[in-house]
Amino acid sequence: MSLIAAARRRTANNSAPSVAPFPAPSPVLPGVCVAVVVVGFAVSAWAPHDRTTWLLEVVWVLIGLPVVVLAWRRFPLSGMLCCLLAAHALVLALGGHYTYAQVPLGEWVQDGLGLSRNPYDRFGHLMQGFVPAVLVRELLVRTSPLRGSRWLAPLTVCACLAFSAVFEMFEWVAAVIGGHAADAFLATQGDVWDTQWDMFCALIGATVSLLLLSKWHDRQLTRLAG
């Protein structure tokens, strides 16, 4: 009986899923991404249109960048995610420097296409879905049983929409506290449906991100796992 029990224990141990730590990839790409973000933030912080608006726009990166760096040894990120996070950080930094309603790039597009408003805010919310979709997907694939599950994509999109909703509530609180002083941060540009448009843009961004990048992301995660 003892031999049978021992055999059962060995079988159970062998069949139990093991979570191997992901080895850290080459530090070159992450280092370049961090350097680009730091330089971009230094430029962005130099004489912004409004210091409070700048801080409200970039606070997410001021919190997120140290977290990524401190957790890197235990939880390195894929190269794709590093590049996307850096790109998103630069989008936030640019919007924070000028305010989203006055970014020159958006004004050029507005004039060129004859739009009624600066579209940089819409682009920022597309990125708010596009980049977090890869972040959420990577976290779920590596820390949950959802890898390969049909629920992975819809739950990723739901998480992105939830974050977008939290951000809109953050804007609401800023408006209640700051009044008209928060107009530059809200960047509604007179659109009464701005909140709904922001969340819709995040939904589109998350959906497009998963459609375009999921297979490529899977290959990166396979290489990261070694």
Image: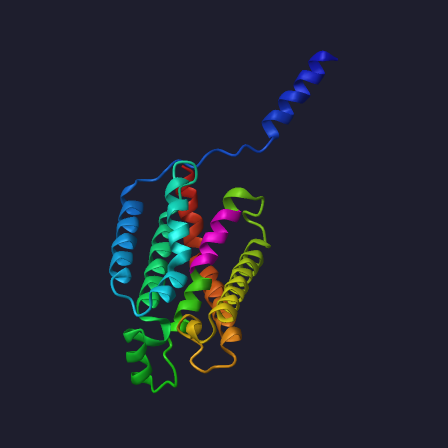
* Magenta highlight: main SS: helix
- Residue 214 is at least partly visible in this image: no
Q: Tell me: residue 27, above or below residue 133.
A: above
The number of numbered badges drawn on the structure is: 0
In the image, what residue occupies the spot 43% across and 40% down?
A: 75
Depth check, front residue: 103 or 175? 175
In the image, what residue occupies the spot 26% across and 57% down?
A: 42
Query: Residue 209's spot in the image, x, y percent?
Result: 44, 61
Query: Residue 84's spot in the image, x, y percent?
Result: 37, 56
Quadrant of res 182: bottom left
Magenta residue span: 131-140
In the image, what residue occupies the spot 37% across and 49% down?
A: 65
* Left or right: residue 144 compared with residue 35: right
Q: Residue furthest right?
A: 1
Query: Residue 81's spot in the image, x, y percent?
Result: 39, 52
* Left or right: residue 114 compared with residue 190: left
- Residue 21 is at least partly visible in this image: yes
Depth check, front residue: 184 or 201? 184
Q: Quadrant of the C terminus?
A: top left
Quadrant of res 67: top left
Color style of the picture: rainbow
Q: Magenta stretch containing residue 72, yes or no?
A: no
Depth check, front residue: 18 or 168? 168
Q: Tell me: residue 27, above or below residue 90.
A: above
Q: Tell me: residue 58, above or below residue 124.
A: above
In the image, what residue occupies the spot 28% across and 52% down?
A: 38
Q: Quadrant of the N terminus?
A: top right
Query: Residue 154's spot in the image, x, y percent?
Result: 57, 59
